[in-house]
Amino acid sequence: MDSGDVRSSFWTLLLSATTLDAAVAVARAEAAGNPAREAELIAAWRSHAALAADAENRMDARLCGLEALQAFGRALGEARSVEDLMRAAARSGPRGSPRPGASGAGSTSCGSPSSRPPR
């Protein structure tokens, strides 16, 4: 294994740590008693964890929008008259999100993206 492979596996190990304690353990082993290096590695892990959480939150928001759009499309597909079509359209809020208290077309079980628990 060349040194590039060792570095790659170290970063994979560090950035795949799911808790701060696990990241600290990996960073401490790599830093070998150098507190400045350990702090740099933990800062890198925190930055990566924040970016990953933001990406997951964006993906959750997109998924929620997709679920709302699918529910709206199903309701429109089931409409038997223009009045049914208008009722289905009225039940959905802006950008496909449900209006408070609405059920049926456009309503989803999606929470806000910030409802994801922190790492």
Image: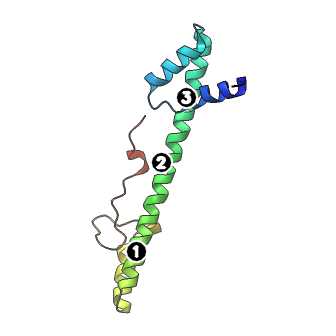
Cα separation between marks 1 and 3: 43 Å
Sequence-first disc among 1 and 3: 3
Query: Is 25 drawn above or below residue 83 in the view shown?
Result: above
Number of the label disc, if any, that sits on residue 38: none
Query: Is 115 drawn above or below residue 85 in the view shown?
Result: above
Q: Is the residue under label 3 in contact with that under label 1 (CB below 8 Å)?
A: no
Residue 45: x and y, percent?
55, 28
Q: Residue at x 52, y 43 (%)?
A: 54
Quadrant assignment for the C terminus:
top left
Residue 24: x and y, percent?
49, 19
Cα separation between marks 2 and 3: 23 Å
Q: Amino acid at mark 1?
A: Phe
Mark 3 highlights which residue? Answer: 13
Mark 2 highlights which residue? Answer: 57
Q: Is residue 31 left or right of residue 56?
A: right
Sequence-first disc among 2 and 3: 3
Q: Amino acid at mark 2?
A: Asn
Sequence-first disc among 2 and 1: 2
**Displayed quadrant of residue 8:** top right
Q: Residue at x 52, y 20 (%)?
A: 26
Dot 2: within a 10 Å radius of its alpha carbon, few (fewer than 14), some, or many (20 or more) residues? some
Q: Amino acid at mark 3?
A: Leu
Q: Secondary structure at mark 1?
A: helix
